[in-house]
Amino acid sequence: MNRKHSRRLFLTLLFMLNLVMGINQDVQASDNPTFPDLSPEKVADYMHSIIEADRKIYTTYVVKRMQEQGIVLAKEDWENKNAIPLPAQFLHLSSKLVAESGIGIRFRLISLWPIQRRNGPATEFERKSLEGLQSSPDIPQRGIVSTGKKKFFQAIYADTAINTACASCHNAHPLSPKRDFQVGDIMGGVVITIPLEK
Amino acid sequence: MDTPPTSETPVKRKKGLTKKLVISMLLVGALPLLIGLFLAFYQGTQKIQEVNGASFKALANETARKLDLVVADELSRTATLTTNIHIIAVLETRRDALSELDAAELTALLQQEQALWEEQNPKFSEPLTSGPIVDILRKQVGGTYIDPGQPVPVVTRSATRALYITDMAGRIVASLDTNPSYLHAQEPWWQGAFHKGVGQPFLTPVAFDPQLQTYTFTLALPIMDSLRYEAIGILRRVYDAKEFFAPSIDIIRFGETGHVMLIDSRGVVLSCPILPTGTSLSDNRLIPLVTPMQAGWTPAPSDGHGGQDTSIIGFSPLTYASRITQASTSLGWHMFVWQSSEELFGPIQQFFRWTAGFGLLGVVLLVTLGYLAAHRIASPIRQLQEAARRIGRGEFQKSIAISTGDEIEELAEEINRMNQQLASQFAGLESQVELKTQEVKYLQESTSQILDSVPDPVFMITNHNTIEYLNQASKDALELSDNGSIVGSPLFQILKVDPKTQAKMEQEIQTIQTSSPQLDLPSLSAPSFTGLRDPLAQAGGDQSVDTRPELRIHYRTYRYRWFAVEAAPGKDAFVGLVLRDTTEESSLQDRLIQGEKLASLGVLSSGIGHELNNPLVGVIGLGEAIQDEDNMDNMKGYAKDIVQHGKRMASIIRDFTGQMTNQSPEAKAPIDMNTQLTRAMNVVQAQFPNPAITIHTNFGSLPLLRANPYELEQAFTNVLTNAYQAIQGEGTIDITTACHEGNIHIRIADTGSGIAPAHLPKVFDPFFTTKSQGEGSGLGLTVSYRILKKLGGQIRLEDNSNQGTVCHITIPVSAEDSTP
């Protein structure tokens, strides 16, 4: 499979994700006047389940199958090579697209041991939440945070090493601060940020 | 034309062998040498290219990685400013303040502040160009400072030409100086870095900055709020491109011209020790060759620095930096390693010169040594060649002295041996040849003598009708004396004959030449006209001269004959001509004929005389008796006798002339042969009354035949007369007639004396007779023969072996005859 093809596939998947988000938005936009507001926790849970499903599909049905059949590999510098993005990069790229859409809701993948520094915890809340998820990964960390006068609801969900590829890649990366990940380890978390005021 | 072996031909070839040997040695030695040298040169060139290319690639890759690290380091250190909590706090405050303004208020505020900035109002600009945030910025720009928590002082680069922070409205928040304009929200780098509030690093292409009078590029980084939720400001850092890259690039030099340079994917030079920053590569064809996204090397048609020579270029992308620049402006940054062609290919050219030099030296050595070696080989061979030529000419010489100790020496010994054997064999051969030559000479002379002694002229004629030889008799006959001028002359120039005869003879020569030698030729001994001449035949019965092999020279008549002479090997055949002088022979024969004629006339006249004499005597006696007789009856009886005698005489004359003078001699009528035979019998019985002779007839039924009855009667009478006369005393004559198969057959057999076998062939010749003088004219059977011939019949006599003679007469019956 050539680069063009892989890019098209990727864009298709992003489009699917966007469609799901779009439906969510439409529901909010059209039903807002007649239905009571959804609680931000629910919104965050919905979003997280979609994000996780998308990433799982990408990881299992795209990357894994492509690599197993020797069609194309997933690589960090996929732009310059005949490759497709890593699952983590898939999440970053979809996060960027959601942010660029300007609807306000954003999500990031963060870790206490990020390969890129910008993917570390930005606030004390995020850092503590990540630490909390280490002990109880099934309970998402939630809270209200502010920047200046702006207030946001944040929910942080644990991100697990679902296969050996995730762990081994992080263990092998020269910029990785931690190199003893195992399958099933909590490698970080997905932060979903929802603005609480217009 | 045979050319005698001259001494020039071998001289021309004298150096042939030497030349061939030298060329062979050159081909065997120099060609592989030159091919080897060329292949070595080609392989060397390829290897040098590969080795240099691989080195260039490695260097480009290495330099690209280093520069990538520099860029990453610069970006990461600059990024520390974007995470500075003080700066973030200031910018969050500004964001909150801005959120409380509506659009119109914001526009008015921006215009007002811009004006203050541009007039450099100290009250307005000072807080923006000094204070704690500016101090933080200043630390990044130059000099040395100790980072809190870092033990080692950080030496910052001096390449930064501007560093300032804007808020999310694009206003200056902090700047090192007042040089930048106040509002930046519309500038590409600002919009690129702000990216709709999402924020992303942005690197601009290198461009000329008219304010700074240098080529610069911008690094713009978003400053995110404390939650990293959105971009609340942009940090811009402007670098002098040359100063930023040169420390990493310009120091890398190898050889005299080898260096690395940084270009972007448009081919614009970012940094090069030779080309100024901002210029483009001299050859656009190079750009696609050197800007792929992986490292490599390529042979290129030019060097990108103005040179048009083939060169080798190593290249490598700056992976990290290119990721940012491509996201920003779709441009990549690429490392380019190059060395001038002269320097790069210098060693190859040197190697080529050495190769060519050694090749030339090798060829010269090969030619020299080859010539010497060839001379050593060719010299004894030439000696052998000369010896062989002499032997071939029969000049036996002394032994050849060659001591090369190899096959040539053995060959020389063999030639010596052969020479000795030839010499001994030649000695015997020479004497034999001399003997044979003498024999041949003797044979020639004796043949010539034999031919000269032949009285008949003999000529040998070539196929060009010229005389090759003529014997003495020819010279005598033709009254010739000079032999030399005759040989080679055309035959008919010497043998002068009338044109008709010449044409005939030429035709005959041609016939002989084109036919086989066994051609049946007229013999000289065979007379051209056989048989005696008929003296009664019309005199001068003209026989054609053309058919007779006779010619006349100088009033002499020659009979001639051609004969073919078998050709000597490799030579043309001759035609021989023999003449025989028949002048005497011809006149003798003519005289003989004349004599015969006269003798015949004598016989004729005496025969006629004798035959006529008896009746004439009777007539005379009766006449005299009449004179003395008075009795009329007696007289009448005498007269009757006289008439009888007259008739007898007339009959005799008729026999002699062979003509029927009476009674319509030519009248033909249908006649019966039996009747004519009976009449003839009556005539003969009346003529020769002899009761001792009995005639038996056995007549068959015969058809009528149209003929002259008198002629036929005469013919039968003559035959019966002969039969009567042949019987001496008693005897019988048997006459038998029959007709079968369209012919009338008549057989007349007598019991007479018969005919001697020697006379049989002559019986029909005129005047041939075995009777005594006066008994027969010798014309009877001749006349019968001619009469029967006229009717198409035949007459034949046979001797019945002492029992008499049988005459067979055959007359054909035609359809005309059968009809009455």
Image (cartoon, coloured by chain):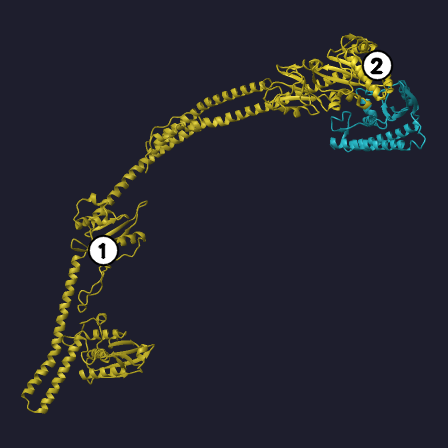
Say which chain tag 2 marks: B
Q: Residue at x 71, y 23 (%)?
A: B331
**Position above or below: B611 against B447:** below
**Amino acid beneath label 1:** Lys
Q: Is residue B610 visible?
A: yes
- Residue B270 in the image: state x and y as whole percent: 68, 18
Mark 2: few/some/many CA within 10 Å (<14, 14-19, 20+): many
Horizontal side, residue A3 vs residue B680: left or right: right
- In the rendered view of the protein, which quadrant contains the C terminus of chain B? bottom left
Query: Please, what secondary structure does the residue beneath circle 1 have?
Result: helix
Say which chain tag 1 marks: B
Mark 2, residue position: B87
Q: Is tag 2's residue or tag 1's residue first in the polypeptide sequence?
A: 2
Mark 1: few/some/many CA within 10 Å (<14, 14-19, 20+): few
- Residue B578 in the image: state x and y as whole percent: 23, 53
Horizontal side, residue B111 vs residue B52: left or right: right
Mark 1, residue position: B500
- Shade of chain A as shown in the rendered figure: cyan
Depth check, front residue: B338 or B449: B338
**Amino acid beneath label 2:** Ile
- Residue B767 in the image: state x and y as whole percent: 17, 72
- Shade of chain B as shown in the rendered figure: yellow
